[in-house]
Image (cartoon, rainbow, N blue to C red):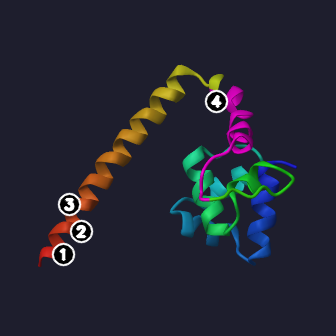
Amino acid sequence: MSIGTRVKQYREAKNWSQEDLAIRLDTTQTTISNIESDKNIPNSLLLNKIAKELEVDINDLLNDAPTVIYDNEFNDQSVANVNQYNPIFNIQSPELLESIIKNQEQIAKLMEIQSKLIESLLKK
């Protein structure tokens, strides 16, 4: 069973629409749809956010069999589960990787601006 299928099952178990999950993850319904239809595989950050919102262990999204992780530490199985998708990421075009890096830099800048704004609001 694919990651997308498991995301859909857990989302539907909560009686959430794709839009509901998208709002909780601060993303778009299209992103959720693409994940659930296996057009896109979420990166590790988004996958972690999905697991937290759906209140499941990230390994439950990666495996068919639930895996228990103690003390929120990665174990060999969870690392292996993530690594099985590395070939998909390694074949990406340099242009796509460059775009991803630029987007991450922009996100970091926006987070810094947001932090400064929150600080200034808290000082008032």
Q: Position of residue 109 (x, y in %)?
A: 29, 47
114 in the magenta segment:
no
Tags 2 and 3 in contact by the CB under 8 Å rule? yes
Under tag 4, what secondary structure?
helix
Q: Position of residue 48 (x, y in %)?
A: 60, 54
Q: Earlier in the sequence, mark 2 or mark 4?
A: 4
**Could you tell me the amino acid type at mark 4?**
Phe
Image position of 93 with respect to 82: above or below: above
Mark 2 vs mark 4, CA separation in Å: 35 Å
Q: Residues within 10 Å of mark 1 (few under 14, many from 20)?
A: few
Under tag 2, what secondary structure?
helix
**Could you tell me the amino acid type at mark 3?**
Lys
Considering the image in quadrants, where does the C terminus appear? Answer: bottom left
Tags 2 and 1 in contact by the CB under 8 Å rule? yes
Residue identified by numbered label 2: 118
Q: 65 or 91, which is in the foreground?
A: 65
Mark 2 vs mark 1, CA separation in Å: 6 Å
Q: Earlier in the sequence, mark 4 or mark 3?
A: 4
Q: Residues within 10 Å of mark 2 (few under 14, many from 20)?
A: few
Q: Position of residue 54 (x, y in %)?
A: 67, 68
Residue drawn at x 35%, y 43% as measured from the top left: 106
Residue identified by numbered label 3: 116
Taking the image as shown, residue 11 lies to the left or right of residue 19, namely right
Residue identified by numbered label 4: 89
Mark 4 vs mark 1, CA separation in Å: 41 Å
Residue identified by numbered label 1: 122
Q: Can you name the residue that lies furthest to the front here?
A: 71
Q: 57 or 96, which is in the foreground?
A: 57
| Bounds of the magenta segment | 71-89
